[in-house]
Amino acid sequence: MAAIITGLIPILRTAVDATTSYKCRSLWFGFLCIRLVILFLAELPFTKLGSDFSCNSTDIICVNLCFNKHFHRPTAVAWNFIYVLFVLSVFVMELFTSHLCSVYQKRSARAKKDVELDSGGKGESPVSPTEAKSRMVLDLHNDRGTVGFYLFSIFLRILVELWFLYVLIFWNLPALSDDAHKCSTDVCSKSLICALRAAPEKRMSIYALASISGLIIICSVTFCIYSIAHYIFKV
């Protein structure tokens, strides 16, 4: 639980303290938090994967070779790496909005200086606290470049989640069978019969991760269609 809280605080602080907002920004940060919690819970059944794998042999070398042969593709490390890519797909848009906010502030300061020069320098126009703390909302209706970059960040998110589903369904799920399987190696003189303990719990972790990933894909595709229709074609 401490790991979850440690990971959630910077994400929530970034979402709350930012001075720039755009369409469904809170939704994407919400998915970041939900995905982090489910990722933490899903990794729990895999913490003792080595001890859950057993064979009808006391030869540790043969058992380890069969374990490496059966789980020859990464699990938790691949999940964490793809989560980092998901975070990057969100922060791509954050970096872009931060750049736009910086450009807007520079233009505002330049315009204010021009107004002061035109008025003869009789005094600076006061800036109210409300204006100083106001949040800049990106106008996606009049800037197709911003819309294109927004769609690009969502498209990256869809690609990341599709890859994650591929890893879950075609890499991890086939290795979590309830059935015992034979294992033969060049080092061991005889074939071993191996089985995995607590396979249903591990498969449930895969299903939970696949569910949230599918939900993210559905929401991303929906907002892609909405943004194209509403901001580009003005429907």
Image (spheres, helix red, strand yellow):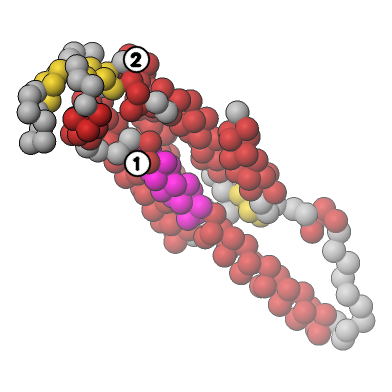
Please state the horizontal and vertical placement of residue 2, each as a whole percent of the image.
Answer: 62, 32
Stretch in magenta: 78-93
- Name the residue nearer the viewer: 212 or 10: 10
Whether residue 87 appears in magenta in the rendering, the answer is: yes
Mark linked to residue 78: 1
Whether residue 17 appears in magenta in the rendering, the answer is: no
Q: Amino acid at mark 1?
A: Ala
Decide: is 20 above or below 5. below
- Name the residue nearer the viewer: 61 or 15: 61
Q: Quadrant of the C terminus?
A: top left
Q: Main secondary structure of the magenta part?
A: helix
Task: Return the residue at label 2.
Answer: 198
Decide: is 19 above or below 58. below
| Residue 232 visible at all | no
Please state the horizontal and vertical placement of residue 34, each as a whole percent of the image.
Answer: 52, 31
| Residue 190 visible at all | yes
Mark linked to residue 111: none
Give left or right: position of 37 versus 198: right
Q: Quadrant of the N terminus?
A: top right
Give left or right: position of 141 versus 15: left
